Image (cartoon, grey):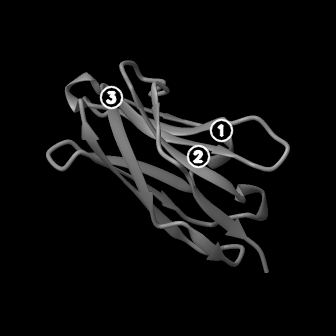
Amino acid sequence: QVQLVESGGGAVQPGGSLRLSCSASGSIFNIYGMGWYRQAPGKQRELVATVTVDDRTKLADSVKGRFTISRDNAKNMVYLQMNSLKPEDTAVYFCSSGRDSWAADYWGRGTQVTVSS
């Protein structure tokens, strides 16, 4: 099992920035991909960004140019820098990890991000 703990969510005005962090522990030798998914009220969970242990990334089209994912393999951490936030980015953001680049085998509890004026 892999345990994931998120931090860094909160409320911000449109155009603002937030940085999410996620720490992984447990059976981390199985981890190839780590990333972030989000789920807005009434919507399905969707991929935001993932990064593999060899720095291959996936980014949703809706966040390209605004969000950056990074990973510190030595610390078992993954980060999501979110800039130019929009109201439609409001969601619960889940840290994830897995054995492939989709990184969807293990999940954190989620952290709320609210973008509102």
* Residue, disc 1: 61
Q: Residue furthest top?
A: 100
Q: Which mark is residue 64?
A: 2
Q: Secondary structure at mark 2?
A: loop
Give left or right: position of 116 versus 85.
Answer: right
Q: Amino acid at mark 1?
A: Asp
For disc 3, the neighbor class at 10 Å (few under 14, some 14 to 19, many from 20) is few
Residue 44: image location, x then y, percent: 76, 35
Q: In the image, is residue 112 above or below residue 50? A: below
Of residues 29 and 3, the one drawn nearer to the viewer in this rendering: 3
Q: Which mark is residue 1?
A: 3
Residue 28: image location, x then y, percent: 23, 32
Q: Amino acid at mark 2?
A: Lys
Quarter of the image with the C terminus in it: bottom right
Question: Marks 2 and 3, Cα distance to the nearest angstrom?
Answer: 31 Å
Residue 80: image location, x then y, percent: 45, 54
Nearer mark to the viewer, of 2 and 3: 3
